[in-house]
């Protein structure tokens, strides 16, 4: 069974038969999204709102780049789902240490603080 347009059941590798126009269109979309981020950066708005808008635009840019320039669009859907879930897991796992990051500044509990660090 074929899950993607360029993947054939008898061939182990995907064939990329996209036209150059498709890539130029995606590139123009990426340029427009980058220009939109530039405009948002200089708008006078709340920092939280600015961050949220720029974050969602950055996610859209990254998604376009992954899907078209890294040819994930032509891969089987199961592999695409695996990449999304695995990337999400890695990003969440990287955040595990932030809850304990204050120990780098003041040291472990019930110990002497590092030299030159102001205690809070």
Image: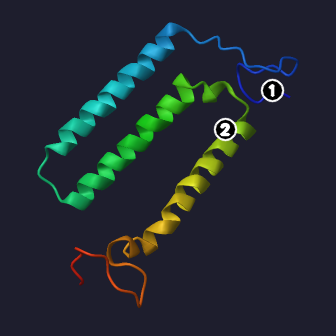
Label ID, residue 40: none
Q: Among all residues in the image, which is located at the extreme front?
A: 115
Quadrant, the C terminus: bottom left
Look at 64% across and 42% down and name the residue there. 83
Look at 44% across and 22% down and name the residue there. 26
Q: Contact, CB < 8 Å: mark 1 with mark 2?
A: no
Could you say where residue 77 lies in the image, as x and y percent from the top left? 71, 36
**SS under mark 2:** helix
For disc 2, the marked residue is: 80
Could you say where residue 55 lies in the image, as x and y percent from the top left? 36, 49
Colour mode? Answer: rainbow
Relative to residue 94, is residue 16 drawn left or right?
A: right
Tell which of 17 and 105 is nearer to you.
105
Could you say where residue 105 lies in the image, as x and y percent from the top left? 32, 73
Tell which of 32 and 118 is nearer to you.
118
Q: Among all residues in the image, which is located at the extreme left?
A: 44
Look at 66% across and 24% down and name the residue there. 74
Look at 53% across and 54% down and name the residue there. 91
**SS under mark 1:** loop
Relative to residue 47, is residue 83 drawn left or right?
A: right
Q: With respect to residue 76, does 115 lie above or below?
A: below
Q: Pointer 1: residues within 10 angstroms few (<14), some, or many (20+)?
A: few
Q: With respect to residue 10, does 54 lie above or below?
A: below
Q: With respect to residue 11, does 57 lie above or below?
A: below
For disc 1, the marked residue is: 2
Relative to residue 69, is residue 32 drawn left or right?
A: left
Quadrant, the N terminus: top right
Mark 1 or 2, closer to the camera? 2
Q: Pointer 2: residues within 10 angstroms few (<14), some, or many (20+)?
A: some
- Earlier along the polypeptide chain: callout 1 or callout 2? 1
């Amino acid at each position: 069974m074929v899950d993607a347009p360029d993947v054939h059941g008898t061939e182990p590798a995907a064939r990329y038969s996209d036209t150059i126009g498709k890539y130029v269109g995606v590139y123009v979309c990426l340029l427009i999204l980058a220009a939109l981020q530039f405009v948002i950066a200089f708008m006078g708005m709340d920092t939280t709102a600015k961050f949220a808008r720029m974050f969602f635009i950055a996610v859209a840019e990254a998604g376009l780049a992954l899907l078209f320039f890294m040819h994930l669009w032509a891969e089987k859907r199961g592999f695409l789902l695996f990449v999304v879930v695995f990337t999400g897991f890695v990003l969440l796992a990287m955040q595990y240490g932030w809850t304990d990051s204050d120990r780098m500044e003041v040291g472990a509990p019930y110990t002497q603080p590092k030299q030159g660090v102001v205690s809070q």
